[in-house]
Image (cartoon, rainbow, N blue to C red):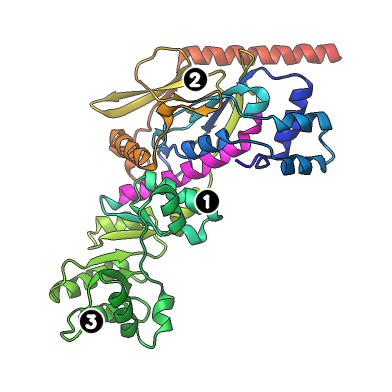
């Protein structure tokens, strides 16, 4: 982790904490206040890459030299930064776990300056990947068993976002990615077809098809550069050329009425004796279009999704927060309207009936409530626990298993008739009320003293 990837106010607060000797144990909770309008659940994602970076958090001499030029930090504080390490504990739900509004996705328990500094990075990493994984899960559900491929890299918001987005989408069930670096970095299968420019660069479409299929037997040919059905006919002609036949694995449709074109293309391929040549579609698809094509029984084998997955077009951000909920053994809250905080360390208990989730309860850490506890210790004293290490494949399998446990009503694209139940335990509500009362009394007393 680049230690300067943080908001400036984290560093100014850090210096103030150090000077005030406020280095007691703090608890911060990362959660999402409310689900976006078009989400019935979120898929927690981004934990493991974030933990790996926290282990390596250091301020370099170049970092410290730069901070010294800002005129905000004294030499004593800059010297203190040279020895900075994250030495806290983290408790989190494993990647691939469905979560809901107000539930802790993770909690950081660390000396206050350490827990404060990592806020920006922790939020950034979990926010992006949770947002993309949640969008991808909807697309995978809409595809109803047909493979979904990530084509989103070129329009995502930066190269690192494209890599991490491909990772998150794969965990959520997407089969492969066009992003070669993400494939290499995370062990995701890389896939690719061809671009319109390849067709345009040749004198004729048929010449382009023959050259590509000869170099890459069994490849996927893009057929809509000139006229889609004419392109399909050209592919068939090349496959049936007795003098020099080519082998084609699939055709790709990238524009037009995909339902009508896929049906017409399927008939042409079947009539020509090529029922095994698959039909791949792309072109600005989202889960609604995918779901519509599936419901109308379009003969499509693979969906390639790009921009609308990569930027989570209908919900491009989450109302994610990282809030102080405890300091020096006492629960802390906020009095701001609409921004309530559940104090202290917490646990989420998920009840299930016949293997299907029926509701969650957010309780105090240490409470013994009915259900499966979701948060687990993943980092201790700044080191990732072996039990918490998870490969991308393991996270993917976990997500698939957790999705099987979700009620079917949540996996549809519309709002369920009955929302998923998330409650707060009576003990935690009492603790919240007591913390609010104490904060109000303390502030009133402070005001009276000042008067």
Residue 182 drawn above or below residue 49: below
Residue that lies at the very extreme toward the bottom in this rendered image: 203
* Residue 414 rendering spot, x and y as whole percentages: 36, 45
Tell me whether the residue at label 3 lies in contact with that at label 1, contact meaning CB atoms closer than 8 angstroms. Answer: no
**Disc marking residue 238:** 3
Q: Residue 133 lies in magenta, yes or no?
A: yes
Question: Element under label 2?
Answer: strand
Q: CA distance from mark 2 to mark 3?
A: 64 Å
Mark 2 and mark 3 lie on one chain; the one further toward the N terminus is 3
Side of 121 relative to 185 (left or right): right
Q: Which residues are magenta?
A: 116-142
In this picture, is 25 found above or below 11?
above
Query: Where does label 1 land, which residue?
Result: 161
State the residue in front, 422 or 42: 42
Q: Is residue 45 left or right of residue 381?
A: left
- Residue nearest the viewer, comparing 81 with 419: 81
Pinpoint residue 297: horizontal percent, then vertical percent. Answer: 22, 59
Q: Position of residue 405 (x, y in %)?
A: 29, 33
Alpha carbon distance from label 3 to label 1:
40 Å
Residue drawn 36% across the image and 26% down it:
359
List x then y, in percent, for residue 73: 81, 34
- Location of mark 2 (residue): 346
Q: Residue at x 35, y 42 (%)?
A: 393
Task: Quadrant for the N terminus, please.
Answer: top right
Which secondary structure is most common in the magenta stretch? helix
* Image quadrant occupied by the C terminus: top right
């Amino acid at each position: 982790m680049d230690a300067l990837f943080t908001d400036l106010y984290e560093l100014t607060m850090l210096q103030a904490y150090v000077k005030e000797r406020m280095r007691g144990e703090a608890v911060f909770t990362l959660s999402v206040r409310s689900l976006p309008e078009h989400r019935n659940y979120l898929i927690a994602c981004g934990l493991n890459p974030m933990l790996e970076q926290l282990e390596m958090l250091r301020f370099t001499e170049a970092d410290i030299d730069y901070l010294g030029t800002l005129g905000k930090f004294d030499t004593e504080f800059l010297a203190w930064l040279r020895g900075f390490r994250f030495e806290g504990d983290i408790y989190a739900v494993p990647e691939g776990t469905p979560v809901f509004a107000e539930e802790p996705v993770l909690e950081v328990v660390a000396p206050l300056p350490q827990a404060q500094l990592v806020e920006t990075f922790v939020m950034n990493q979990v926010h992006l990947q949770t947002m993309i994984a949640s969008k991808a899960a909807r697309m995978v559900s809409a595809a109803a068993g047909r493979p979904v491929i990530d084509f989103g890299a070129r329009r995502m918001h930066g190269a690192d976002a494209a890599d991490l987005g491909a990772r998150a989408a794969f965990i959520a069930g997407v089969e492969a990615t066009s992003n070669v670096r993400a494939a290499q970095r995370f062990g995701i299968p890389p896939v690719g077809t061809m671009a319109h420019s390849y067709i345009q660069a040749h004198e004729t479409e048929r010449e382009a098809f023959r050259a590509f299929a000869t170099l890459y037997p069994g490849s996927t040919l893009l057929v809509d550069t000139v006229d889609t059905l004419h392109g399909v006919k050209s592919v068939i002609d090349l496959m049936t050329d007795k003098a020099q036949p080519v082998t084609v694995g699939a055709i790709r449709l990238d524009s037009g009425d995909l339902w009508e074109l896929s049906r017409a293309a399927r008939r042409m391929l079947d009539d020509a004796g090529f029922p095994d040549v698959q039909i791949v579609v792309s072109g600005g698809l989202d889960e609604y279009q995918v779901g519509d094509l599936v419901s109308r029984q379009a003969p499509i084998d693979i969906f390639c999704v790009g921009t609308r997955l990569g930027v989570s077009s209908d919900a491009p951000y989450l109302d994610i927060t990282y809030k102080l909920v405890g300091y020096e053994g006492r629960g802390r809250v906020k009095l701001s309207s609409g921004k309530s905080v559940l104090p202290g360390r917490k646990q989420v208990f998920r009840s299930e009936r016949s293997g299907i989730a029926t509701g969650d309860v957010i309780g105090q850490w240490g409470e013994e409530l009915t259900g499966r506890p979701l948060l687990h210790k993943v980092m201790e004293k700044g080191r990732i626990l072996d039990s918490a290490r998870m490969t991308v494949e393991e996270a993917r399998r976990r997500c698939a298993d957790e999705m099987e446990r979700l009620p079917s009503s949540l996996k549809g694209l519309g709002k369920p008739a009955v929302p998923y139940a998330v409650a707060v335990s009576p003990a935690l509500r009492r603790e919240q009320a007591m913390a609010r009362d104490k904060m109000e009394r303390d502030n009133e007393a402070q005001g009276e003293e000042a008067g």
